[in-house]
Amino acid sequence: MPITYTSGEQVEVYRFSIPVTIGVPLLALFVQAFLPLRFPRFAVYIDLPLLVTIFFAMARRSPVAGLFTGAVIGLAQDMLGHNPIGIYGIAKTVVGYGASSLGVKLDVENAGARFLVTLGFYLVHSAVYFTVARGLVNMTQTWSWSRGILAGLANATLGTVLFFLLDKFKQRT
Amino acid sequence: MESVLGRYRNLIILVGVLFLQVLGLATQVKRGGGNDPENTRLIRIWAVGAITPFERALVWGQNGAANLWHNYFYLRGVRAENRQLKDQIEQMRLEQVRLSEDAAQARRLQTLVAFKEQFISRTVAAQVIGSSGSDLSRTIYIDKGENAGIKRDMAVMTADGIVGKVLVVYPSVSQVLLISDQSSGVGALLEKTRLQGVLRGTANGEVVLERVMSDEQVPVGETVLTSGGDQIFPKGLPVGTVSKVGAGKDLFLNIKITPAANLSKLEEVLVLVEKQERQAIAEEGVHVRAADILAQRLPSVPDKPATDAKSTQGATAGATTGVPKPAAPNAAVKPAGAAGTAPSQTPKSPSSPSNASTVPAAGPSGKATDRTSTPQKNAAAAVNGQQSDTSQTPPAKATPKPAEPTAPPANSPPPATESSPQ
C-alpha cells in the first residue's frame, strides 16, 4: 500500500511505495557506512543520507512529512556513530522541513535548481550540526569554509545525478 | 486559537520535534558526558542490526571473489615472491638469534628487580565490515562481538600497530573507536627519548601527542610506542612515528603522529581478548656475571691457526692460553672427559663449516675443540630452531677470562676458526 503525502497547495505532489520509502534511506545509510572502508575520503565529502532527505522532502512537498523524514534518517545516522543521538537528527529535521517548504514554492525539477538547493542545504546542515555539536554537546569542532563549500559542491553534483535516478520511483498522486 | 494552531501547525510540529531531540541530547550528555554510547545501546542496536548484516554479506562476498582471483587465477610472480620470502626468513632467523639473547638478558635483569609486565596471551582476529559513515565519529564495526568473547575497552590492533579500543559490544558485532577520533586517548611514549604523553585524535582525523613539554627535544621520525599507562594497551606496542613537531598551547609541544597502522584502510584487525600480568622468569641455571655480559659486548680476537694451537700443546690449560679467543665459561670448567663427550651430545654435520673447522684446533684433551666449537654450534642450533645445550650449562666460576657469547650477534663476523685447515 503506497504512502501518500499531500499539501494544500496546487502543486504536483508525489508519493513513494513502502519499499522505496524504507529501502532507499536504508541503502543510503548502508553505502555511507560501507564506502569509507574502501574510499576513506567519501565520508569527509559526501553525505548520502542528507541527499536522500532533500529528495524525499522536495518530492513530497509536505513540511511535516519532510521534517519527519529528516528526523528519522538523521537519528538512524546518529545511531551508527558513537556521538550522542540527535545531532544529525536535529540537523536533518531542519533540512527536511526547509527542503519541503521550498519545494512547495519553487520548481525544483530542473538540474540547476536542484544543484543550488542541494548546495545551500548542505551548508545549512553543516551549520546546524556545527552549532549543536559545539553548543549543546561541547564537541571540539572547527569550521572551515573551504572544506564546507568543496563538500557542498561534491554533494550538489552527486545529488543532481542521484535525484534523476530516484525520479524513476516517483508516483503521481 | 484554532486558526492560529492551524496556521502555524507545521512550525509547531517542527519546534516540538526539535525540542524532543534536544531533550534527548541533554539527557545523554547529563548521563555519560555525551560520549558514552553504552547509555543508548538499546536504541543503537536497531540501526546496527539493520545495517551490519548487509555489510557482513558484502565483505564476505568481496573476500570470496578476491580469494578466488588471487589463489586460483592470478599467481604471477609467486615463485619469485616465494624465493624472496625464503631469503627473508633466513635473515630473520639470524636476527632472531641475536634478539633471543637480548631477551634472555632482559628477563634476567627484570627478575632482579621483580619487574611485572603485561603479555598478550590471546587475540581474536576480526574483519572490518563497516564504519560510522561520518568523519565526526571515527569508528569502525568488526564482525566479532560478545559471542567471540569480546568485551568493552579491549585493545584493537594490526600487525603494524594499534588501531583503537572496543567501544560498544553487540552479540555478533562490535564498534571500535579509532585512535584518530577526538574522544580517544592512549598513553604513549617516545622510543628513544622515553618522553611520555597522551595520544589524541583531532577533529580533522589527525593523531597528535599531547602533554610533552616544549623544552624537550623531539626528533621527527622517532617511533612512538604505547606506554601501558591507560590499562588498555600493553606497553611497547607500535603506535606510529613523529611526523611534525611544533609549538603548542600552554608550554606543551604539538607533535603530529603518523599512525603505524593504516587507519583509513583497515581490513582485518586483532582484538586483544586476554593479557597476563606476570613477572619475568629467567632461564634456570644461567647465571652470567655483569663482567661476562660486558665481555660479550667487546670484540673478540680471532683464533690462531692450528699450527699455533699445536705448538702450545702440553702447556697448562693449553687451550686457554693457546687460543687467543676468549673462552666460553662453560667450556673452560669442563673436565677433559666431560669435554670429550661434548661432541657426541651435539651431533655434528659433516657439511657444517663450523664443525669441520674446529677439528684441527682440538688439543689432546679435547678442550680446544669444545671451546671453539660451542658458540658456533649454539648459533647454528639456534638458526635451525634448536635449543642450545650449553644454555643449560652453568658458567665458569674459575676462569678469569671474559666469556664468549653463546650466540653471537647475527651481524657480527663469524668466529675465526674457519681458517684452520688440516
Image: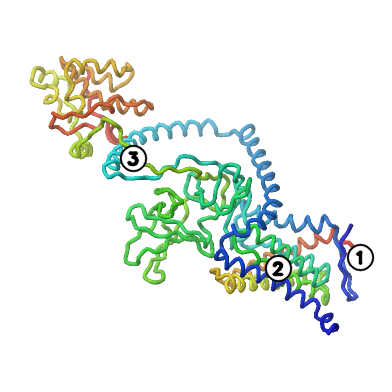
Horizontal arrangement in the rendering, residue B413 relative to residue B172 (left or right) = left
CA–CA distance between discs 3 and 2? 56 Å
Question: What residue does disc 3 label?
Answer: B280
Q: Amino acid at mark 1?
A: Thr
Whether residue A42 can be seen here: no
Image height of B148 relative to A143, above or below: above
Horizontal and vertical percent position of residue B16: 73, 74
Residue at mark 2: A92
Q: Chain of mark 3?
A: B
Classed neighbour count for the residue bearing mark 3: other residues with Cα under 10 Å, few (<14), some (14–19), many (≥20): many
Element under label 3? loop
Which mark, residue A173?
1
Quarter the C terminus of chain B occupies = top left
Q: In the displayed structure, does residue A171 sit left or right of residue B62?
A: right
Q: CA distance from mark 1 to mark 3?
A: 77 Å
Q: Are marks 1 and 2 on the same chain?
A: yes
